[in-house]
Image (cartoon, rainbow, N blue to C red):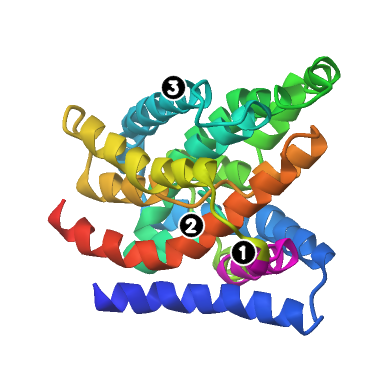
Amino acid sequence: MLQSYFNIFVIFILMFLGYFLSFKQWFSNHTADTFSKMVLNLGLPCNMFINITSQFTKQEFLALFSGMIIPLLSMSCTFFIGILLSRSRLVQVNRRGVFVTMFTCSNTIFIGLPINLAIFGEKAVPYVLLYYIVNTSLFWTFGVFQITKDSPYYQQATLSFHPLVFLKKLFSPALLGFIVGLIWVLCQWPVPKSVIHLGNHLGNLTTPLSMFAIGIMMYFQGIQNLKINREMLLVLIGRFLLSPLIVWLCAQWIHIPKMMLLVFLVQSSMPVQNSVPILARTYQADEAFAASTMSFSVFIYLFYIPLLLILLPHI
């Protein structure tokens, strides 16, 4: 467990280094966008392809997708609870949609993938992506719709959302890398060594650039301005307590491999989805609340992860 935490702490050092280099003006706010694009369009697709083709046989992969029912069921339950809370007096009316989305959807790639790699190694990657598919689908449908409802120009905002936007986000380069790798495995084709070497080099960009991007975003959102409020506290409870608890309860009724369950638990307890502040700005929702909550959830996660590492061996 101690070694796992040291591995995770190294990842957070990368995040703090991104923060520090932003303070030293090595990085600008646009640098985070560049790093994000490199991760999503280069690092992750290669990482997915190499890991799928090297970690699984055709028979092993055919049995994999039955596990998607757990994240689908657990996130649906969390979403429903978030809706109920948002309609109470605990959440301001103009924050309801952003609140529900942050309460439900987690950061499954930029933080989720590096953390799972640090704890479980490369064998966790397919399970990470299974959770990512469900998380992304829910986020770019129900989540975006909830955020648009916070806009003072709700009618125009909803009209600007098109199903093609969802399909483009869902079938991202990362997922396409996964699909190509899946086809390769099912067809049982050999992967050329040169492709493996290139894929490994590009895939190794994923963790450092992801954490640099998070550190840059945290700097420009301003840690010194973070002040926890009632809605933030409820989001943190949803992310770090309720969501993994529902995953564990679902697994008591639906049998899945232990490694899959552990990865799902880690994925379900990730900080807030990093796209929420961007969408809040786009649809003129409460961007400050979204950005502050996302930054606060990342900061709190550093102290939360040791508790999770203590619990995981006992599950």
Circles 2 and 1: CB atoms closer than 8 Å: yes
Residue 135 can be seen, yes or no: yes
Label 2 packing within 10 angstroms: few (<14), some (14-19), many (20+): many
Q: Main secondary structure of the magenta part?
A: helix
Label 3, secondary structure: give it: helix
**Residue at the spot 37% in from the left edge and 62% down from the top edge:** 304
**Residue at the spot 78% in from the left edge and 23% down from the top edge:** 161
Query: In x, y percent, where is residue 291?
Result: 67, 51
Does residue 215 belong to the magenta stretch?
Answer: yes
Mark 2 or mark 3, which is nearer to you? 3
Q: CA distance from mark 1 to mark 3?
A: 30 Å
Q: CA distance from mark 2 to mark 1?
A: 9 Å
Does residue 136 belong to the magenta stretch?
Answer: no
**Residue at the spot 61% in from the left edge and 30% down from the top edge:** 92
Residue found farthest to the left: 314
Residue type for callout 2:
Leu
Query: In x, y percent, where is residue 45?
Result: 61, 53
Q: CA distance from mark 2 to mark 3?
A: 26 Å
* Image side of residue 253 versus residue 73, left or right: left
Mark 1 or mark 3, which is nearer to you? 3
What range is drawn magenta here?
A: 206-224
* Image side of residue 276 versus residue 251, left or right: right
Residue type for callout 3:
Phe
Give the residue pinned by disc 1: 210
Give the residue pinned by disc 3: 80
Give the residue pinned by disc 2: 113
